[in-house]
Structures are given as structure tokens and as C-alpha cells.
Image: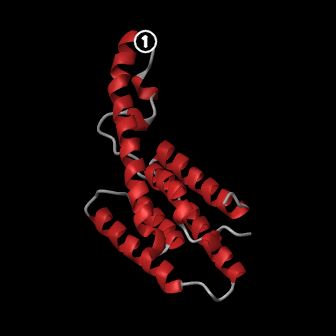
Amino acid sequence: MLSLIWILFAVLGLVAAVTDLAAYRIPNWGTLAFFLLFAAVVALRGANIPWADHLGAFAVCLAGGILFFALKQVGAGDAKLLAVVALWSGFGALIPLLFWIAVAGLLELAVILGLRRLVPRLQKLFPQIDPARLPRVLMKRQGVPFGVGIVAGAIVASFWFPPWLWVA
């Protein structure tokens, strides 16, 4: 399972997650890199790829992401990242993918909210901490960068993805 392709998949994901955590933004080049890596894997495998399965999962998640973006529940980068990760999973691993993204997202939310509650207490103990210099993610009334949950869930769920993706 730990092939070069899987490592590249994980590294691209970690770059997207760290960028989202730091800047509340997932750059288009990161999502495009996920897509291009998938396209390269497909090109290496030949014509026996279940296209409808993978493109269908992509389309369903993109439509859902657009809906949640329109409702201001996720960012555009989150919607695109979820769709491209679903492209990798196909319908066969879509349920594990969404499950692990939900679990990772809840864990991320709990950690961030816990840290946000801890910051004011630490500021009382250490008054030299300048609140203006804290990372945005630790400030109250800020959103939660969901790209972190998407990536963490995708890495765990990748063990349910089709095995042909990871064979070098």
C-alpha cells in the first residue's frame, strides 16, 4: 500500500491541509495536482478503468460541495478538494471516504474549539502573549478549515480505495 503514488497522494493532501490551516485557503494548484496525479495513474493503467464509477463519485461530491458552498457551510476550496478526493475513491469507497472525513472533521472541530477555550486561560497565566499574534484558527468567531478533515479522512479512507491506484 505504501507506494510512491500513495505517498504523493498523502503529501499533496498534507500540503493542502497545512495551507488551509494557516491561510483558510486551498489553492487551485493543489486541487489540480491531485487531479493530475490521478490522471497520470489512469494513463499508466490503460483503458480498463471504471470511469463512470470515479467520475460519478466526483460529480456527486462536487454537486454536494457546490450546494454547501452556496449555503455558506464550506469554502470553494473545500468543495473542490472533496470532489477530487472522491474522484480517487470512486463509488466503491465513497461511503468509507465520507465516514472518515466526518470523523476527522469532528475530531478537528473538537481540538480547535478546545484550543480556543484554552487560549484565554493561557493569556491570563502568560499576559505577555499578544492576542493579535495568535494564528487565526485559534481566534473565536472564525470558521474551521475543513480541508484538514477532508485530507485526514481521505488518507485513512485511502485503504478502501481501489488497489490499482497504488500499484506503481
* Number of numbered labels in the structure image: 1
Residue 36 can be seen in this image: no
Task: Determine the image quadrant of residue 117.
Answer: top left
Q: Where, quadrant-wise, is the N terminus in this rendering? A: bottom right
Q: Amino acid at mark 1?
A: Phe
Above or below: residue 112 compared with residue 31 = above
Task: Determine the image quadrant of residue 45.
Answer: bottom right
Q: Is residue 79 left or right of residue 50?
A: left
Coloring applied to the structure: secondary structure
> Which residue is painted at 57% across and 55% down in the image?
13
Across and down, in percent, residue 96 comes to: 43, 62
> Which residue is painted at 43% across and 80% down in the image?
56
Q: Is residue 158 left or right of residue 136?
A: right
Q: Residue at label 1?
A: 126
Above or below: residue 150 compared with residue 49 = above
Q: Secondary structure beneath disc 1?
A: loop
> Which residue is painted at 50% across and 51% down in the image?
152
Across and down, in percent, residue 64 comes to: 33, 69
Residue 54 can be seen in this image: yes
Q: Is residue 11 left or right of residue 117?
A: right
Task: Determine the image quadrant of residue 46.
Answer: bottom right
Across and down, in percent, residue 38 comes to: 61, 72
Task: Kindly give the residue lying farthest to the bottom in the view shown.
Answer: 47
Across and down, in percent, residue 92 comes to: 46, 73
> Which residue is painted at 34% across and 45% down in the image?
143
Above or below: residue 54 compared with residue 5 = below
Q: Where, quadrant-wise, is the C terminus in this rendering? A: bottom right
How crowded is the residue under tag 1: few (<14 C-alpha within 10 Å), some, or many (20+)?
Answer: few
